[in-house]
Image (cartoon, rainbow, N blue to C red):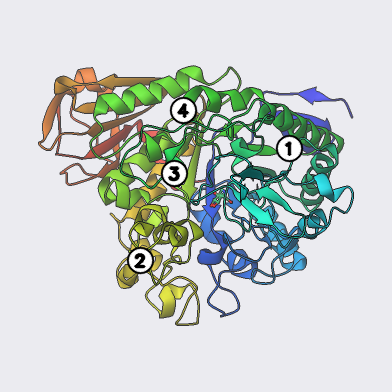
Amino acid sequence: MFWLTLVTCFLFVSWGTAVDVNWYKNIIVYQIYPRSFKDGNGDGIGDLNGITSKLEHVADIGAKALWLSPIYKSPQVDFGYDISNFTDVDPNYGTLADFDRLIAKARRLKLKVIMDFVPNHSSNQHPWFQKSIRKVKPYDQYYVWRDAKIVNGKRQPPNNWLSNFGGSAWQWNDVRKQYYLHQFATAQPDLNYRNTALNQEMKNVLTFWMNRGVDGFRIAAINFMFEDAKFRDERRSNKTGIPKDDYDSLVHIYTKDQNETYVTLKSWRKLMDEYSNRTKSDPKLILTEAYTTHDLTIKYYNAGSNVPFNFMFINQLNNESSAMDFKRLIDKWVRTVPKGSVPNWVVGNHDNHRVATKFGRRRAEQIIQMSMILPGISVIYNGDEIGMVDRNFTYAETVDPAGCNAGHNRYYLKTRDPERTPYQWNNSTSAGFSTKAKTWLPVNPNYKTLNLQVQEKVYYSHYQHFKSSASLKKQAVVARGSLKLIIYPRYKILSISRTLGFDTVVMLFNFDKVSVTLDAKTALPFSSDLVVHTVIGDSDFRLGTFVSTDSITLPQSSTIVFTTPNLFWSKNEDV
Ligand code: NOJ
């Protein structure tokens, strides 16, 4: 019978083809930074064939989707975020045919592929910009151009807006005799979303990649897409001790978070939904990057984002944070996610210090563990599964424009090179990243001992803890179970528990510098039935053993995960 049948998870749209409308609701998304993941051709720069050769690793760690940072044609001023052709692959990374092969292998491994989509700006080398300079129609309106302000007979930028990478956000163009806006590098002119032709071009870009089989988009810097239509000056912030042209010296009420952004996102959601309905395929995933307030982040859900990045581990919590701080922020996220949507937990990315550097290795493992037990989506940056750490850079070594522009004395405050060093696969040349000894960024010298190959063999390694935590993500109790967060005695223990029917997962996280003993009956609702699933930190707990019914002692700064026995035994099985 060829009838349409609706079941809980699968919508059968024709005999044999099932559309899974919930595919993304409880998964790990793994971010790959292509320049640094795996070099397939020995030129010292990572590429698509390199990534394809390592897709088994992505599947192995339990990820369901990989998000590729930009692979588009680009002069590489901002390492791919300055795009000169939105529908082609940069020769550094390969060809469209290589991309197709990557997609085909990902399909075989049941991995979804998410592209970075960079709508705010293009490269100044993009043909659109070159034509815009010469006022060729319709490109003349594709960018944000303004006349100079003349002060005392001298040419000045139209207003006081600043670039994220320092200095004025306006650059004079001597051919067009106007300033153009660039909220990032000078070589990244901002696109003008008040122009409908430009808007249509960008929709065509989305369709181009959907036709090539991509499953969704991570939309970069989405909250910079629109600016105040009146181009008003921004007021000064109260930050002290920073240069006058530092981005943080202004309060960005006219260059960020404008309402029109949400309207445009809705139109992209519609485009993608129409596409997946037409092609009878799984819904496309939209992840949005906006460093903004909680309320404005949550608002992206209503405009069609499935994953408005939750950056609380990155910018709201640190090593001083208490159990209560964690609980308060987690509760707030879970409480404010709209009905039918899911929370997400970003552990790290290519724009911020590595989680193991910011929090230390052990706390980083605990945060990863947390992101796996909490409901929704865990977003993992490549290398964090083996606890890679930042490498310090001298100014002379610095290549990130954010660092270079900040100058000799302040580059280290802004540079993102430390978290972008090549992936550490093994202890051979260039950590197995490349056959070339000189790579685009130097390999962290700790690769001899800190690498995937070593950690695969060690039972209690960062990698093994990661895999153990990740195994829980696939369980129904984590997908659909109830969630409870409790703070225990002296406010030092955070308990996160999930329960569904007879299944239970409890994570006890000791924030104290001394060991703490808890009454097991209070801490573990079904204590007699629980076994030790994962141990992070020094502890006598043995994996797979039943927990005592009276008291539990948690060594300082440790985390123990207890589960019902079935969840322990299915640890390494695909469920
Ligand atoms: C967002 C990206 O994550 C970041 O790396 C980049 O520098 C900015 N967009 C500007 O292109």
Residue identifier under label 2: 393
Q: SS for tag 4?
A: helix
Contact check, label 4 and label 2, Cβ < 8 Å? no
Q: Which residue is mark 1?
A: 282
Q: Residues within 10 Å of mark 4 (few under 14, many from 20)?
A: many
* Residue at (51, 24) in percent of width and height: 480
Taking the image as drawn, is residue 304 in sight? Answer: no
Q: Nearer the viewer, mark 4 or mark 2?
A: 2
In whole angstroms, how far apart are the C-alphas of marks 4 and 1? 23 Å
Element carrying mark 3: helix
**Residue identifier under label 3:** 470
Q: Tell me the amino acid under the disc marked 3.
A: Ala
Which quarter of the figure has residue 518?
top left
Disc on the earlier residue, 3 or 1: 1
Image mark for residue 477: 4
Q: Amino acid at mark 2?
A: Phe
Cβ atoms under marks 3 and 4 closer than 8 Å: no
Crowd rating for badge 1 (residues with CA inside 10 Å; few <14, some 14–19, many 20+): many
How many neighbours does mark 2 have within 10 angstroms: few (below 14), some (14-19), or many (20 or more)?
A: some
The residue at the point 53 percent across, 32 percent down is: 234
